[in-house]
Image (spheres, rainbow, N blue to C red):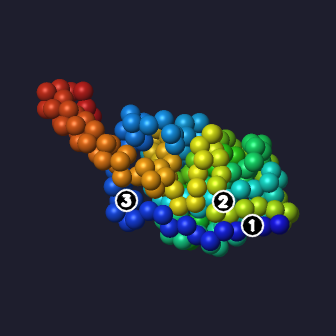
Amino acid sequence: MFHIEPRKITLTVEQRARYQHLATSTLGHFTDFGAITSLLPIQRPVRLLGTALTVRIPHTDGSIIRQALIMACPGDVLVIDVSGDHRRACWGEFRAYAALRKQLAGVVTNGAVTDWEALTQLRLPTYARASSPLTTRALELEGEINTPVAIEGVTINPGDLVVGDDDGLFIIPPHRADALAEAAEAKQAQEDEKRSALKAQFPEWFC
C-alpha cells in the first residue's frame, strides 16, 4: 500500500538563496544537528541545494520511487530512505535520466546505487552509501512519499532544505534557516577576508 502526502512548501525563495554559496563546513561550526557525514558524493566537485521530497521504501521494493519522480518539481532533492537495506541499489542510470528531465536538484539515499560510472558522468548531484550490482524490484508492496524519514540519525521532513558539497550534507529545517544563515554568512565573510590577505602575502601557496 502506498501512502502519499501532498507537497510541502516551507521555505521562501529568499531563505533558499542565502544558502547558495554557504559551505557545509561553515554550517558545521555552529551546529551538529542536521549533519550527514557518512554518505559519499558520486561526483566531485559537487554542489547541491534544494528542498526535500522524501521517499521511504520497504527494503526490496523500489516501485514508489517512480511515483516520487512523477510528483517531483524542479529544485527538489529526492531523499530516499531504504529502511536499512544497504545491499540493494535503489537508484541507477535511467532513474537519473528521469530526474534530470524533471530538473531535480539532486538525490540523497542511505542505500546503494548502481551504474556508478554512468552516474559520475551526469550533472545530477547524488549522495549514496555505496554501489551495488543488486537492485530493488518493482513489487508495488508499499512505500511512502512526503513523510518524515531518517538518514544517519538525522530526521528529514518534506520541504527541509538540503545543502551538499564535497564535505558532506546538511539538512536545514525551516525554523532554523534564518539564524544559521546569518551566522554562517558572517563567518564565511571573515574567512574570505583572511584568505585574500594570505593570497596577497603568500601567492606561492596558491595555484
From the top left corner, tell me how far across and down residue 23 is, in percent.
Answer: 38, 43
The amino acid type of the residue labelled 2 equals Thr
Please tell me which residue lies in front, 43 or 185: 185
Give the answer, above or below, for where 197 lies relative to 119.
above
- The Cα atoms of the two marked residues, 3 and 2, are separated by 22 Å
| N-terminal label among 3 and 2 | 3
Q: Residues within 10 Å of mark 3 (few under 14, many from 20)?
A: some
The answer to whether the residues at label 1 and label 3 have Cβ atoms under 8 Å apart is no
Look at mark 2 in the image and give the residue it sits on: 147
Dot 3: what SS? Answer: helix
The quarter of the image holding the C terminus is: top left
Q: Earlier in the sequence, mark 1 or mark 3?
A: 1
Q: Where's residue 125, x and y in %? A: 52, 53
Earlier-in-chain disc, 2 versus 1: 1
Marker disc for residue 90? none
Q: Any mark on residue 15, and which?
A: 3
Residue nearest the viewer, comparing 89 with 71: 71
* 2 and 1 marks in contact (CB < 8 Å): yes
Q: Is residue 97 left or right of residue 196?
A: right
- At x 25%, y 42%, the residue is 186
Residue under label 1, please give it: 3
Q: Residues within 10 Å of mark 1 (few under 14, many from 20)?
A: few
